[in-house]
Image (cartoon, rainbow, N blue to C red):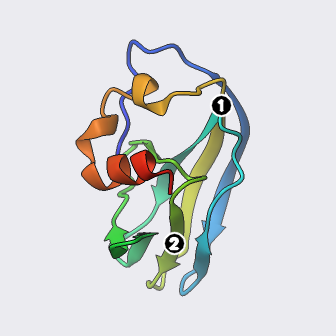
Amino acid sequence: WAFDASRRPMGDICRARIVRLPSGGTMPYHRDETASENIRVICPIITNEGVDNAFRDEDGEHLFKFPATGHFYTFEEDKIEHAVFNNSDVDRYALIFTVVGVNNLREWDRAYKRNDMFWKAWSRGM
């Protein structure tokens, strides 16, 4: 989901990169090794309806579309198992960066509690 960090203290950005997922490609399920005081942020640059952002928890697999609208997306990437499936004939590009010094995503992101699945997963420590 898109996060809202307006009027929040901002951390420093590091490890920024543009990542390409080729058409037909997969980023398999994983958890990131982001330090607890840092968060990973994703901004899709080129994507389409054939790209699925997948999250897996005890209730199964959940698929989401992250459109390339200029919004930024984040979640507890070290706790929630996630993957990306590019089921299209177009390469997917995304800006991914790490924000350091943000140890409480719930306080930093005013929209955090709006997404029930991520809130439950965060609460369970998945």
Q: Is label 2 in contact with label 1 (beta carbons under 8 Å)?
A: no
Mark 2 closeness class: few <14, some 14–19, many ≥20 residues within 10 Å? many
Residue at image point 51% right, 59% down: 80
- In the rendered image of this protein, does residue 123 appear above or below residue 4? below
Nearer-the-camera pick, 42 or 47: 42
Left or right of 52, for residue 126: right
Check residue 84 in the rendering and tell me which mark sits there, or answer none.
2
Residue at image point 55% right, 74% down: 91
Identify the image quadrant of residue 4: top left
Name the residue furthest right.
15
Check residue 37 in the rendering and tell me which mark sits there, or answer none.
1
Q: CA distance from mark 2 to mark 1?
A: 24 Å
Q: Point out the tag, 2 or 1, that comes first from the N-terminus.
A: 1
Left or right of 46, for residue 66: left
Residue flagged by tag 1: what amino acid is it? Answer: Glu
Residue flagged by tag 2: what amino acid is it? Answer: Val
Where's residue 71, x and y in %? 38, 42
Q: How many marks?
A: 2
- In the rendered image of this protein, does residue 94 appear above or below residue 75? below
Where's residue 120, x and y in %? 34, 51
Depth-wise, is mark 2 or mark 1 nearer the camera? 1
Residue at image point 40% right, 54% down: 121
Where's residue 54, x and y in %? 43, 71
Check residue 14 in the rendering and tell me which mark sits there, or answer none.
none
Mark 1 closeness class: few <14, some 14–19, many ≥20 residues within 10 Å? few
Secondary structure under the numbered disc 2 in the rendered image? strand
Residue at image point 44% right, 65% down: 47
Secondary structure under the numbered disc 1 in the rendered image? loop
Identify the image quadrant of residue 100: top right
Where's residue 112, x and y in %? 34, 36
